[in-house]
Amino acid sequence: MNDAERATRLEIHTIQPIAAHARHGRARDLFTIWFGSNVQLLTIATGALAVTVFGLSFTWAVVALTVGNLVGGIFMALHAAQGPTLGAPQMVQTRGQFGSIGALLVIGIVIVMYVGLVSSNIVLGGAALASLTPGWADTPSIVVVGVVGVVAAVYGHDLIHAYARVMSYVSGVVLLIAAVWIVRVHGLPADFLLRNTLSTTGLIGTISVAALWQISYAPCVSDYTRYMPADTGAVPAFWASYWGSTLGSILPMILGAVVGLAAPQVGLVSGVALLTAGISPLVLIVFSVGIAASNAINLYCGALATLTFGQTLFPTWSPGPRSRTGVALILFGFALAGAILSKDSFLAHYEDFILLLLYVLVPWTAINLVDYYLLRHGKYDVESFFRHDGGVYGRVNRAAVACYFLGILIQLPFIASALYTGPIARALGGIDLSWVVGLLVTSPTYYLLAKKARSRQGAAAEPVARHEGVGAISVDDIPPDHKVFFI
């Protein structure tokens, strides 16, 4: 079966490990799924924060956005190797670090994150489409943009890959055309490079937001690599994911900084339309359609996370495509409601939302990567992921849960946001170093505690040899007492 045939078939797997005979794809496919899903309006809006909220000049905005994405992209791309090795979704793998019940804490937070990202996406996409037709309300456009993403999420993994592959070329070309048009045809204000100034607070804040943009993908990276053959190289998977996501983010974010500085008196969508006057329908339509690729990723991963949550509570349940479809529609319903209610105050709440994600995702990614690369070296007992008692990983890994809460608490004094500013951040003049501190504290603490716990447990904590390094079981391999019904 070729890529086109796979893309038009309904995916039958959900959270079950992917058997060896069902594996397909190449590492280079990871470049397009992350590039194609990032070149869209929400990425542009994130880049605009550098000059509108954080007050940086264009030059320093480019520096900060680039550094933040390059640093955050490391943590995002390191998760890429986990999918081919284990064949299971990212949130299912989290049971290997937190235990079957302990993982519910992280999974619940991730589900909320996906709903919030979908809401943010469709607000911008709806506003862009509505702007093309005078008198047309935002709400119908929001629904239209959202529905396109739902369709791709329902068909599943291969259609999402195909959609993002097409959008990589289309959105990439339109992004280049828009940049040339703004500079050569519309022109930039004479004092463009002199607007705003450098501040340490703005520089660190922009780097943090850009890094979080990359880290926010970490909980779903394996969802798009788990179908790849087990012998897919970790290094090619890393670099394809890294450059696809970082380049796909840096370039539209720079465009966002241009729009924020050159058209500060209007909103983001109006600013893009103003600066690309003459080709604005093309630009806005393509970037709105690009939002659907991002939404499909978020809804699909959100559905897998929700099914993982449910299967933890009902261990005999093995969810199928109908379950994934129903859950995706429910999540979209919540996202749609949030978008309609918040569309008039989107930018006011968006910064707070992504900073909140930063504080809760950083400890998780630190624990996950330390456990996978430094402690277990990619060797897990995949069958234990689907046991109610957690198998060799237990119901709750106290070290992981304790370090997760420690990672959140240790950030509190360093947080600087509109909602809360910690004492250390206040003393530093509003500089937010929370995510850096979270990584530096959580990583070594978990390594030491988990290594000590594993030493006490001995061989009982090691994965069964026949499952080392391969996610080679499928729904047909799940023990009978764990496979009562498949919906």
Image (tube, helix red, strand yellow):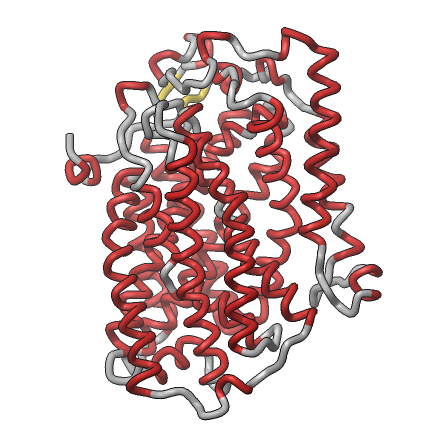
**Left of 7 or right of it: where is 381?**
right
Observer-nearest of 143 and 132? 132
Q: Quadrant of the N terminus?
A: top left
Is residue 179 positioned above or below 158 on the image?
Answer: below
Q: Quadrant of the C terminus?
A: top left
Q: Position of residue 190 (x, y in %)?
A: 45, 92
Is residue 431 positioned above or below 213 on the image?
Answer: below
Observer-nearest of 62 and 420? 62
Q: Who's the residue at 29% across and 50% down the image?
A: 164
Observer-nearest of 53 and 153? 53
**Left of 467 or right of it: where is 395?**
right
Observer-nearest of 376 and 485? 376
**Left of 408 or right of it: where is 32?**
left
Is residue 155 positioned above or below 93 on the image?
Answer: below
Q: Who's the residue at 44% across and 32% down the image?
A: 81
Residue 201 in sight: yes
